[in-house]
Image (cartoon, rainbow, N blue to C red):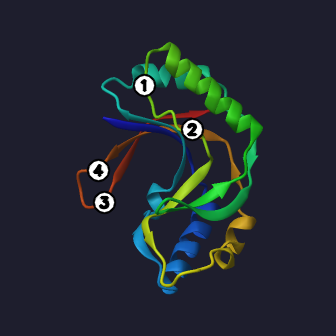
Amino acid sequence: MRLFIALPVPTDLRRALEDVGTSLRRQGVRGRFTPPENLHLTIVFLGNVSDPAPVIEAMRQEKLPRTALTFDRLTLFGETLVALYRQNDALEQYARQLRAKLDAAGISYDRQTFRPHITLCRKTAFPAPGFRLHAFERPLRAARLTVRETRLTASDLSGEKPKYTDIFRKTD
């Protein structure tokens, strides 16, 4: 099963992200926009895992940080449009400690540098060269992402749209 550990997106932020996506589409931006119900901030992408029990145990052992993330800007990671969040020491430490517990349990995961972001659109195509994203950032500046819960989620990519199913939720 294809798994990832992520922070859920609260309702107010989800609405703001939906509004941004709608505005971008109206201005001619094309691509595979993330459905609102699939929006999340990935802490660790695990990939295919046969038994989630050791991952759940690692998550249970690690205390969630009491922190809120602040939006930085809309940007591209290659062809992927993301809402990038400012680096946050408490969340960085949580991600490091969680990864250390996964290492100790022998669980493999994607070791890319952790950059807190929410994926808005894949295979993004802009209507014209020099398209400016900053005009679409305003609704995201006021919406905070407070860390209250983390989830272990399975992603099923076999259908027309990705389907996410939460396997475990942790709150402190």
Amino acid at the residue labelled 3: Lys
> Helix, strand or loop at disc 3?
loop
| Badge number at residue 16 | none
**Left or right: where does residue 122 sit relative to residue 20?**
left
Amino acid at the residue labelled 2: Thr
Disc with the residue nearer the chain's start (3 vs 2): 2
**Left or right: where does residue 118 sit relative to residue 37?**
right
Q: Position of residue 154 (x, y in %)?
A: 37, 40
Q: Residue under label 3, please give it.
A: 161
> Helix, strand or loop at disc 2?
strand
Rendering quarter of residue 7:
top right
Q: Is residue 52 above or below residue 126?
A: above
Amino acid at the residue labelled 1: Ser
The residue positioned 54% from the left and 26% from the top of the image is: 59
Q: Residue under label 1, please give it.
A: 108
Depth order, front residue of 109/162: 109
Q: Is residue 119 above or below residue 18?
A: above
Q: Residue under label 4, please give it.
A: 157
